[in-house]
Image (cartoon, rainbow, N blue to C red):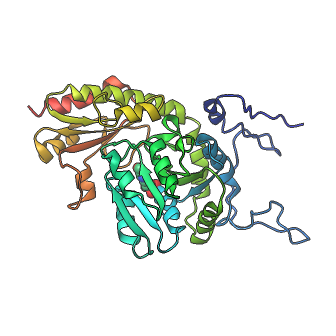
């Protein structure tokens, strides 16, 4: 008889390390297979051997392990993989109906901000924004007609913190759902569903996969309701599905999520403190710093660290910031985040002339290198400004 090795009493971290103790029933393989088939043969009664698995735009068995891992990581009822973080996020908005009122942050992942600004009206959605850095602004934006409240915390690229328990209370009191982009917090530091969120979204491209080699997105729900059913239908019929190889790489990446994220988070705090002490740095934004405006709330809702993302403003404006980025050696000058390698990014350049981001701001994605090496690299690049 096959051994049941999924020990539900073990810590989540232990279960995730082994991919929820996957073992193939036929072969005993401890690593799940990749199913590349797009179509599945029916039996003599014209029934599918594995109900629901008939065509790979609807369902791919390769998703099972990573989707179960995601649901466990977020303490949710179900999870769905998508082709990208944007495909996952926009599926939530596409599942709404014309006339639905949405409340979204003023500062958030810029690609989604741009998509919502461009398409929400075409879609018939009534968009209301709130100021991420002002805790009362969300309360004012949510009204009885609100259907969905979207929150990102910590939010790109200033890492403002939103109180999720409070946001859930406000949303639910108005009869709205709360959806949280938790890409930056990761389930290692925050589990929004346990704080009241209805849907959690991840750009799995980032820390969940962790190796800058997969484009994928995920949604996790608190309960399988009609709205979740609409999202699942939207994935299959809209066709923004995750590739089989990407889904497989993602389950592999997630096995080391806790190790990578704890290390990166610890280093990010050390880097933030070192930057704060440097005379060429005007300001550092990181929720882990005691004087950050979001620190008290972050300390309450995040655990085991404050994440691997921080930003700092360089004295001397745009040119000085670009000079620092250009001199860094361990930090590659590249967009994206959450990989094992550290990255630096000049957000204002990426976002273009309409960007609300200060042009002396550099965003860091801290990887798993030795913290002292990262600090030494930043120090040499800043020292050269004198
Ligand atoms: C990258 C990112 C997204 C979009 O994910 P893609 O996989 O690039 O589509 C959404 N939200 C946040 C916070 C991100 O960092």
Which residue is located at x 20 percent, y 49 percent? 358
Which residue is nearer to you in this view: 326 or 363? 363
Find residue 316 and report its horizontal and vertical position in percent. 10, 41
Quadrant of the snapshot with the N terminus: top right
Which residue is located at x 70 percent, y 62 percent? 37
Q: Quadrant of residue 59?
A: bottom right
Q: Position of 180 compared to 25: left or right?
A: left
Q: Give the farthest residue toward the top.
A: 372
Which residue is nearer to you in this view: 235 or 227? 227
Q: Position of 129 compared to 384: left or right?
A: right
Which residue is located at x 44 percent, y 37 percent? 340
Find residue 166 and report its horizontal and vertical position in percent. 45, 44
Find residue 205 and report its horizontal and vertical position in percent. 48, 50
Can residue 306 be seen from the camera position used here? no
Can residue 77 be seen from the camera position used here? yes
* Position above or below: 127 against 142: below
Find residue 143 and report its horizontal and vertical position in percent. 42, 60
Quadrant of the snapshot with the C terminus: top left
Q: Quadrant of residue 51?
A: bottom right
* Position above or below: 380 against 311: above
Q: Give the total number of marks visible in the rendering.
A: 0
């Amino acid at each position: 008889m096959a051994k049941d090795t999924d020990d539900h009493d073990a810590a989540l971290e232990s279960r995730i390390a082994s991919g929820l103790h996957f073992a193939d029933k036929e072969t005993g393989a401890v690593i799940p297979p990749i199913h590349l088939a797009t179509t599945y043969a029916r039996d003599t009664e014209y029934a599918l051997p594995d109900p629901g698995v008939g065509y790979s735009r609807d369902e791919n068995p390769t998703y099972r392990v990573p989707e179960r891992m995601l649901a466990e990581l977020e303490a949710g009822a179900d999870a769905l993989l998508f082709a990208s973080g944007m495909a996952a996020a926009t599926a939530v908005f596409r599942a709404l109906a014309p006339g639905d009122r949405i409340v979204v942050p003023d500062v958030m992942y810029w690609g989604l901000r741009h998509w919502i600004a461009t398409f929400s009206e075409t879609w018939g959605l009534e968009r209301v924004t709130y100021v991420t850095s002002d805790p009362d602004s969300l309360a004012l934006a949510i009204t009885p007609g609100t259907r969905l409240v979207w929150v990102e915390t910590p939010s790109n690229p200033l890492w403002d913190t939103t109180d999720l328990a409070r946001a859930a209370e406000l949303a639910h009191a108005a009869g709205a759902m709360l959806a949280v982009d938790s890409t930056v917090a990761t389930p290692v530091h925050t589990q929004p569903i346990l704080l009241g969120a209805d849907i959690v979204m991840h750009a799995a491209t980032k820390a969940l996969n962790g190796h800058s080699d997969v484009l994928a997105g995920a949604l996790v729900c608190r309960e399988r309701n009609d709205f979740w059913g609409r999202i699942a239908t939207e994935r299959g019929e809209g066709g923004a599905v995750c590739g089989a190889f990407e889904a497989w790489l993602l389950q592999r990446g997630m096995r080391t999520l806790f190790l990578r994220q704890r290390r990166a988070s610890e280093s990010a705090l050390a880097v933030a403190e070192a930057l704060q002490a440097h005379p060429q740095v005007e300001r550092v934004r990181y929720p882990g710093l005691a004087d950050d405006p979001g620190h008290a709330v972050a300390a309450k809702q995040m655990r085991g660290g404050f994440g691997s993302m921080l930003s700092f403003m360089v004295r001397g404006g745009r040119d000085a910031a670009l000079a620092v980025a250009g001199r860094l050696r361990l930090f590659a000058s590249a967009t994206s985040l959450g990989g094992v390698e550290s990255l630096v990014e000049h957000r204002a350049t990426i976002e273009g002339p309409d960007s609300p981001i200060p042009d002396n701001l550099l965003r860091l994605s801290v990887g798993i290198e030795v913290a002292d090496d990262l600090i030494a690299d930043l120090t040499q690049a800043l020292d050269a400004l004198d």
